[in-house]
Amino acid sequence: MNKPSEYHKKGYTCGEAIIKAFNDEHNTDIPVKLGSSMGTGFTTGSLCGAVGGAAVIIGYLKGRESETESNEARKYTKELMDSVNLRYGTQICKELKKNKISCADIIEYTYDELNRII
């Protein structure tokens, strides 16, 4: 199994790398292409793609199919977002880069937190 940061080095976006590594480790089949638009902070330096990819996984695993179901994905995503913000002070890609946080660091931390939360 490759670490998500290794997939990123091979050319996957942060979001794709998180999804691909999760699929490998957990034998899931979440479409990797769901993370394709997440590179470089959703292409504008906004939300970190690794965080976005992790949120997609949470939605896939804990989401709902109808408005009458409880939305469990929200509480798990909030826990992830709070954890990333506590560690780095932000989830915004351009701010992470300005603070010299490497993509590998945020990808690995987010992936570890995703696995802990799920």
Image (tube, grey):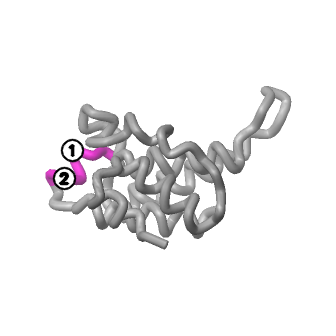
Q: Amino acid at mark 1?
A: Lys
Q: Are marks 1 and 2 in contact (CB under 8 Å)?
A: yes
Q: Is residue 15 above or below residue 20?
A: above
The total of numbered circles placed on residues is: 2
**Residue marked by disc 1:** 94
Residue in the foreground of this view, choosing between 91 and 20? 20
Q: In the figure, residue 107 lies in which quadrant? A: bottom left
In percent of the image, x 22 and y 48: which residue is there?
95
Report the span colored magenta. Answer: 92-98
Look at the image and say whether residue 94 sits in the magenta stretch: yes
Q: What residue type is disc 2 on?
A: Lys
Residue at image location 31% in from the left, 60% down from the top: 88
Instruction: Specify the quadrant that holds the C terminus.
Output: bottom right
Residue 56: image quadrant is: top right
> Where does label 2 land, which residue?
97
**Residue 32: % across, % down:** 50, 45
Residue 54 image offset from top left, x and y in percent? 51, 52
Residue 47, relative to residue 109: is it above or below?
above
Residue 16 is situated, as x and y percent measured from the top left of the image, at: 43, 48
